[in-house]
Image (tube, grey):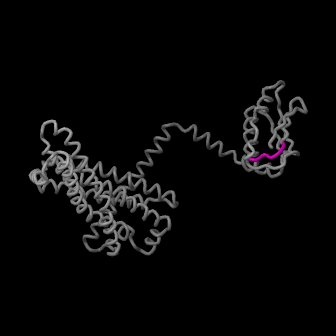
Amino acid sequence: MTELRVTRPLEHTILVELIGHWRLQEHPPLMQDLVREFRSNPPAQFFRFNAQALESWDTGLITFLLRLQRICHRKHMTIDFSGLPQGAQRLIHLATVIPERQENMRLRAKEGRVFRLVTKAISTTDGAQDMVAFVGETFITFFRFLRGRAQYRQSDLALAIQECGAKALPIVTLISVLVGLILAFVGAVQLKQFGAQIYVANLVGLGMAREMGAMMTAVIMAGRTGAAFAAQLGTMRVNQEIDAFITMGISPMEFLVLPRMLALMLMMPLLCIYSDILGILGGAIVGVTMLDLGAAQYFYQTQEALTFTDFSVGIVKSVVFGVLVAIAGCLRGMQCGSSSAAVGLATTSAVVTGIVFIVVSDAILTVMYDILGV
């Protein structure tokens, strides 16, 4: 049982008697009686406690007393904790011994929007500089690889190729077929109104070969492989393994980043072609089963609509996307902090950065293709 008894032994003094068990599970009483005393006349100036009937207590009592102390300070009242147990007095002293923290909170509250905007701008600028520096180091490392001077293990490259290639086939298969189905459905809704269902094959074939095959494969790899790269390198950063490489004179860019980037550069074109074929098959399922088109007729129309240039456009995009996904994943992994929470943040940032890179680069490449007439 928790009880609070309020008396006035003197005209300007409030005496609070704490009775029973003041624990969190006992639900300490509210401050209604005390607030009523604050409003009474004549106003009180001193606050004292009597804890002789207090049987047990925990942080619930300390929380109650700290709230009461803040109220007394606002009303310019003097509060005396000498009647409390020694342990409670020490805890209250520890909780209030550093008033500078409250001053810092007030200073932060006074910081205007301009200050926060400038801070954010400086942080963004530093992040952009780090990104440019990392991209530069990546290309230097790649040129060293072309000259045969890069130090890396071929077994790491083979393992990365397996992770980026064969193990990614199930999810690429599912997404590609579904994208082909969706494109066929979207085209069929409009083309059926004109009796031009056969051109669904053109829509699906061109859409997959030039755009959706490379795009969807890249998004899948950003969420799957880019995040894995960030988590792996981030964990190595937390365990100080990257610092150990630098200490031993081994370049982390060559030993860790290069195999991952090469693996995505090699596998993305193959996955893109695989995605194109499965997307066309997904469109054929809709064309044959729902639009009453013959399978031979559908694939003949697809063959007439597509050229080698259309496939080349998507393959070039896939190579660019692969490089960008690898850079995004490795960049965020190398920038990871020194805690487990930082690894999670690096993984999330790698996925977001990779997808942004993919969309921006796709827009740039599409405009370039249009200017070149490809």
Q: Name the residue: 48% across, 45% down.
A: 119
Looking at the image, residue 167 lies above or below residue 97: below
Residue reaching furthest to the top: 41
Q: Which span of residues is magenta-colored?
A: 19-23
Judge whether 233 appears above or below 204 on screen. below
Residue located at (74% from left, 50% from top): 94
For residue 183, above or below residue 222: above
* 53 inside magenta stretch: no
- Percent position of residue 81, x then y: 82, 43
Asked whether residue 20 is drawn in magenta, I would say: yes
Residue 34 picture location, percent across and down: 79, 33
Which quadrant of the structure image shows residue 230? bottom left
48 relative position to 157: left or right: right
Residue 32 position in % (x across, y down) = 76, 32
Main secondary-structure element of the magenta-colored stretch: strand
Is residue 173 in view from this perspective?
A: yes
Q: Is residue 368 visible?
A: no
- Pick whichever, 116 or 367, lies toward us: 367
Closer to the camera in the image, 241 or 340: 340
